[in-house]
Amino acid sequence: MPAPRVYYTEAIVLSRFELGEADRVLTLLTPHDGKLKAIAKGVRRPRSRLGGAVEPFAELHLVMARARTFDVVTQASVGHAWLKLRDRLESTATAWYLAELSERAVEERAFAYPVYALLRRSYQLLDDGMAPGRVARWFEFGLADALGMRPEVERCVECDRVLEEDDEFRWVPTQGGTLCSRHGLPIGEQMRLSLAALKLLRAYQRLDIEAIAGLRQPAEVEAEVEQALRWFIRNVLEREPRSAAFLDEVRSNRKLVGVMTPSAQREGLPTA
Ligand SMILES: [Zn+2]
């Protein structure tokens, strides 16, 4: 039996670009159909039935019609919008960063429910006001895990020895995590990891997100873990996310208001 021509799905918009006079092509993440590209026809016209509904940072209910290149969005409504997330520039930039990581991580029409659930929860946490850095690290750890590449933070990736507190630790993303001091390595493929940073990495693995939210850590430990996990995820995805630079800019200048958002940058920029 052929697949039905019309189908329903929930979806989160990961990115979009404008097509022609009034259309928009959306990259969507769905719970059961993975990532897919769809066209929202006439969405930029003032009185479009779809207009306003097919925005990022919301869980959408979509009725879609299959077509040869892109499926067509025929009906759209907002199931849940994470509106408060947009009140803070750093949360918004983080939300774009997480969307881009999801887009890079998931193949079209491939099973991706764990990534969908992770992104959905992360948007909710940002919306609830959780520190964007904590949400981003939790997401990065969870994404690597969902892709079958969970960072090793308990044992040495080389000799499988349980890491002891008095050891010296090195972080080696190309080898999958933490290395003990017994092994030599060429410079450039590793960074030193403090015990406090290793413990925080372990917290991302062991604790639920409510417990992680309550952890108090010095800024330098947070920075170390950020560097480690961003490097790790860059290695997993084999490229530097474009939105990471924007996120860094936002954080280095938190007074920045009303600047061009990645959505504006993305529009007109078809994704590869
Ligand atoms: Zn070792």
Image (cartoon, rainbow, N blue to C red):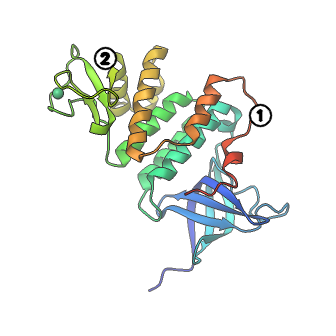
Earlier sequence position, callout 2 versus callout 1? 2
Position of residue 34 measured from the top left corner of the image (x, y, whole percent):
47, 60
Element type at mark 1 = loop
Residue placed under numbered mark 2 in the picture: 195
Position of residue 143 measured from the top left corner of the image (x, y, whole percent):
41, 44
**Counting other residues with Cα less than 10 Å from the Cα at mark 2, is it few (<14), some (14-19), or many (20 or more)?**
some
Residue placed under numbered mark 1 in the picture: 258
Left or right of 22? Residue 77 is left
Position of residue 171 measured from the top left corner of the image (x, y, whole percent):
31, 28
Q: Residue at x 84, y 63 (%)?
A: 47
* Nearer the observer, 189 or 97: 189
Above or below, comparing residue 196 to residue 174 in the picture? above
**Counting other residues with Cα less than 10 Å from the Cα at mark 1, is it few (<14), some (14-19), or many (20 or more)?**
few
Above or below, comparing residue 204 to residue 270 in the picture? above
The image quadrant where one finds the C terminus is: bottom right
What residue type is disc 1 on? Gly
Q: Residue at x 49, y 41 (%)?
A: 240
The image quadrant in which ligand 1 is located = top left
Decide if ligand 1 comes within 8 Å of the CB at mark 1. Answer: no
State the separation of the CA atoms marked 2 and 1: 40 Å
* Nearer the observer, 53 or 155: 155
Q: Residue at x 61, y 53 (%)?
A: 15
What residue type is disc 2 on? Leu
